């Protein structure tokens, strides 16, 4: 059985980054809300407690039972997790005189302890907390300090329990990966057996067992996630898989025809369905972003329900759901704290009478690409930028019309083709154009114009959970701006989005 690590989530924005760093060590891990821990704790080799926006001193602070984890499994508390271990196990946590946020350097490191093996003195770490540990828990021993934080790291003697008040998962902690490696591999002795090949091998066995002789219907989008999910299912069950590519009227320019052609020769059993009028009619007059997603999700289900009835003996709906979709749709604090809903997360209405099969549900985007490579898939397909499920609907701010869709498709095509011509496409995680609900004054020739404004967006990311804007060459932006304004009737202004995630999301809606 593959060894795995449990991450208990206390609501931190960095929790998913912990998972990413663990996966980079070729170790499988799972994130579970602190209030819904897995029952099968015996399956985990180690556990990590995440950070949190809460204070351990607050009345409503997350307060899990650790009696089956602490002292039983190697345990690492990060930030809130470390303060929790101190506060509830004999130590003292108090408000800091000043908020400890940002870069700091270790002024003391116990390099003799295996936890800090190969971590140098003055190593840079990233702090993000308003409380400090003034007194360590019972049997606690200080392992590291900074200028302002005496107990930056500690261990509990007699157990494989550790706590750190900095975040090893962020890139600003220069030796953070080494710290995680020391804990998971050196102390917890977790095997590094999480590889694309092992995932494929394990998943094919699971899919064959789960699906059996039943038929599966799967929606292809042309993107990496659905394509890799389809190839995994195809490899496992062959012609029992029925793929459908739906044109929702919100795809990129000529994408419906190009995607169908792209899948030729892949051996997939695929049918193209043009439902663009059905989607666009349903979206008429809708401007709220969440309502758009719900309308698209509902229409998508209606189309699939009709298509599933056309295939005899279908029991399963295959989906390319990936881990960031799941993480962003489930919050430890309830539905009000979710970032956005995803129409492919959370199950299906009862009337469809189909069970879900999601072979990529526990993978991050870059892991999906590695799995696709392991399956021998086309590199051009695997290198394709992510494209949102709701398509251009969430890149058109405000109400959607067929005219706006056409204009944005033209703008987007010029931008994406330009990136490819300038050899910039493969250096970017995701790029696209946004139609803004703004008219602005312009001058074309000797005439005054009052036309639409569009924004261009290009970001770098490793997982889609955090992202930085790409510093595209000015001469490229100049050329693309001119090309858009000269060729897309109705656009007289182009702007470039230079906001990062967080605080901004990659998409505008």
Image: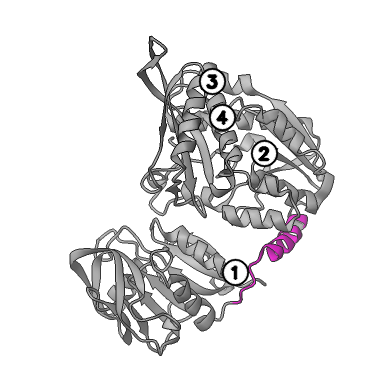
**Coordinates of residue 456 in the picture (x, y in percent):** 46, 34
The span from disc 3 to disc 2 (Cα, nearest Å) is 27 Å
Q: Is residue 73 visible?
A: no
Q: Which residues are magenta?
A: 191-208
At a point 74% along the width and 49% down the height, the residue shown is 231
Marks 3 & 4, CB-CB < 8 Å contact? yes
**Coordinates of residue 133 in the picture (x, y in percent):** 25, 74
Q: Kindly identify which numbered label has been placed on residue 26.
A: 1
Vertical placement of residue 52 versus 455, above or below: below
Between marks 3 and 2 in the image, the one whose residue lies nearer the viewer = 3
In the picture, the quarter occupied by the N terminus is bottom right
Residue 418 on the magenta segment:
no
Label 4 environment density (alpha carbons within 10 Å; few <14, some 14–19, many ≥20): some
Marks 3 & 2, CB-CB < 8 Å contact? no
Foreground residue among 494 and 134: 494
Foreground residue among 277 and 448: 448
Residue underneath mark 3: 487
Between marks 4 and 2 in the image, the one whose residue lies nearer the viewer = 4
Q: Kindly identify which numbered label has been placed on residue 414.
A: 4
Label 3 environment density (alpha carbons within 10 Å; few <14, some 14–19, many ≥20): few
In the picture, the quarter occupied by the C terminus is top left
The span from disc 1 to disc 3 (Cα, nearest Å) is 48 Å
Q: Earlier in the sequence, mark 4 or mark 2?
A: 2
Determine whether the residue tagged by mark 2 lies in a helix, strand or loop. loop
> Would you say 62 lies left or right of 302 here?
left
Determine whether the residue tagged by mark 4 lies in a helix, strand or loop. helix
Magenta span dominant secondary structure: helix
Label 2 environment density (alpha carbons within 10 Å; few <14, some 14–19, many ≥20): many
Marks 4 & 2, CB-CB < 8 Å contact? no
Residue underneath mark 2: 222
């Amino acid at each position: 059985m593959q060894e795995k690590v449990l991450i208990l989530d206390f609501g931190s924005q960095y929790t998913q980054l912990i998972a990413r760093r663990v996966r980079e060590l070729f170790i499988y891990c799972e994130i579970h809300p602190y209030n819904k821990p897995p029952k099968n704790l015996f399956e985990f080799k180690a556990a990590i407690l995440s950070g949190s926006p809460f204070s351990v001193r607050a009345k409503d602070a997350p307060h899990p039972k650790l009696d089956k984890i602490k002292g039983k499994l190697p345990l690492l508390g990060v930030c809130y997790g470390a303060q929790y271990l101190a506060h509830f196990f004999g130590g003292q946590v108090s408000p800091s005189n000043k908020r400890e946020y940002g870069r700091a350097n270790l002024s003391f490191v116990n390099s003799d302890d295996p936890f800090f093996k190969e971590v140098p003195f003055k190593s840079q770490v990233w702090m993000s907390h308003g409380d400090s540990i003034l007194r360590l828990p019972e049997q606690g021993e200080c392992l590291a300090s900074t200028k302002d934080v005496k107990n930056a790291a500690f261990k509990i003697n007699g157990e494989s329990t550790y706590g750190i008040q900095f975040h090893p998962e962020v890139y600003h902690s220069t030796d953070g990966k080494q710290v995680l490696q020391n804990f998971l591999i050196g102390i917890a002795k977790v095997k590094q057996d999480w590889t694309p090949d092992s995932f494929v091998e394990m998943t094919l066995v699971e899919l064959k067992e789960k699906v059996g002789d039943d038929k599966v219907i799967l929606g292809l989008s042309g993107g990496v996630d659905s394509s890799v999910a389809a190839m995994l299912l195809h490899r496992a069950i062959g012609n029992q898989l029925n793929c459908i590519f739906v044109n929702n009227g919100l795809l990129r320019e000529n994408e419906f025809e190009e995607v169908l052609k792209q899948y030729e020769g892949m051996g997939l059993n695929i049918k193209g369905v043009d439902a663009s009028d059905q989607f666009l009619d349903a979206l008429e007059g809708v401007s709220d972003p969440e309502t758009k997603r719900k309308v698209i999700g509902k229409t998508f289900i209606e189309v699939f329900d009709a298509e599933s009835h056309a295939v005899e003996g279908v029991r399963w709906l295959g989906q390319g759901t990936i881990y960031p979709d799941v993480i962003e749709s489930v919050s430890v604090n309830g539905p009000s704290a979710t970032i956005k809903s995803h129409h492919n997360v959370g199950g299906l209405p009862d009337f469809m009478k189909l069970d879900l099969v999601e072979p990529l549900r526990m993978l991050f985007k870059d892991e999906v690409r590695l799995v696709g490579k392991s399956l021998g898939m086309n590199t051009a397909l695997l290198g394709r930028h992510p494209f949102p499920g709701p398509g251009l609907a969430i890149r058109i701010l405000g109400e959607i019309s067929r005219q706006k869709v056409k204009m944005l498709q033209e703008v987007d095509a010029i931008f994406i083709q330009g990136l490819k011509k300038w050899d910039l496409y493969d250096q970017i995680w995701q790029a696209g154009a946004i139609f803004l609900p703004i008219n602005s004054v312009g001058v074309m020739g000797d005439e005054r114009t009052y036309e639409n404004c569009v924004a261009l967006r290009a970001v770098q990311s490793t997982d889609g959970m955090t992202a930085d804007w790409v510093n595209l060459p000015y001469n490229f932006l100049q050329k693309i701006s001119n090309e858009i304004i000269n060729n897309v009737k109705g656009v007289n202004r182009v702007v470039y989005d230079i906001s990062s995630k967080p605080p901004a999301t990659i998409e505008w809606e």
